[in-house]
Amino acid sequence: NAGVTWSRPQNITPALDKEFDFHIPGPGHGTQLKNGRLLVPFWHRKHGVEVPKQERGYCVSYLVSDDNGKTWEHKGYFGQNCLTNESRITETADRLIWNARGGDPYRYESYSYDGGDSWSEFAPAPIPPAPRCDSSMVALSAENGYEDTVVFSHVSHPEKRKDIELIISRDGGRHYDDVLKLMQGDAMPGYSDMAVLYEDAPVICLIHARNNHVIFSRIS
């Protein structure tokens, strides 16, 4: 009923193994593919911040469900060499994009062409470098010029968590040619997430945190 009421929560922790001390979803949203499959990305590490970054065991995995969330299967682990952690999975016209924060200012991506059964090796994404921070990504599945549009939200300052902007791809995330600057200045902690509403034309709903406040933006 469109989120008016909800079932009792289901504990899916047993689907994850005990190899890591941290099993953290997202942050942000999971993804439902056009075929109904549910994908929820997780990030992991074996040790806390008291250990050097390269020794913490950062990587990502995901939970997949093909029965509307009744049962879940764990798939992993990926991106160990890039120290991947906070991530999003997005479906475009011809592939899935798994975009992840890495251990340096660059974002990393892996691609699936079979609905998430297999993935390419993580490699640098076609996105400008920025401070290590969570970002969000959504794809628009609409007609009239939006057929293969991907939108990416992030802090864009090269050194600090400042200046939130959207960058826009018209070819399924292969190149980003358009920029929409939103709030300039301090954006701490800089995290953001997006959802897409379909009205007369797609509307992007952006939620981001700034100075311990949650800010909502509606972008048409």
Image (cartoon, rainbow, N blue to C red):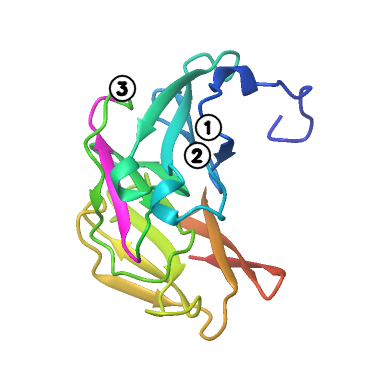
Our reading of the magenta stretch's main secondary structure is strand
Q: Which residue is mark 3?
A: 117
Task: Answer with left or right where residue 180 lies relative to residue 111.
Answer: right
The one of 108 and 154 positioned closer to us in this rendering: 108
Label drawn at residue 20: 1
Residue 1, picture quadrant: top right
Question: Residue 153, located in which quarter of the rendered image?
Answer: bottom left
Q: Which residue in the structure is indicated by mark 2?
A: 44
Tell us which disc is closer to us: 1 or 2: 1
Please, what is the three-letter code of the amino acid marked with disc 2? Answer: His
How crowded is the residue under tag 1: few (<14 C-alpha within 10 Å), some, or many (20+)?
A: some
The amino acid sitting under disc 3 is Asp
Q: Earlier in the sequence, mark 3 or mark 1?
A: 1
Q: Residue furthest bottom?
A: 185
Marks 1/2 in contact by CB < 8 Å: the verdict is: yes
Q: Residue furthest front?
A: 51
3 or 2: mark nearer the eye: 2
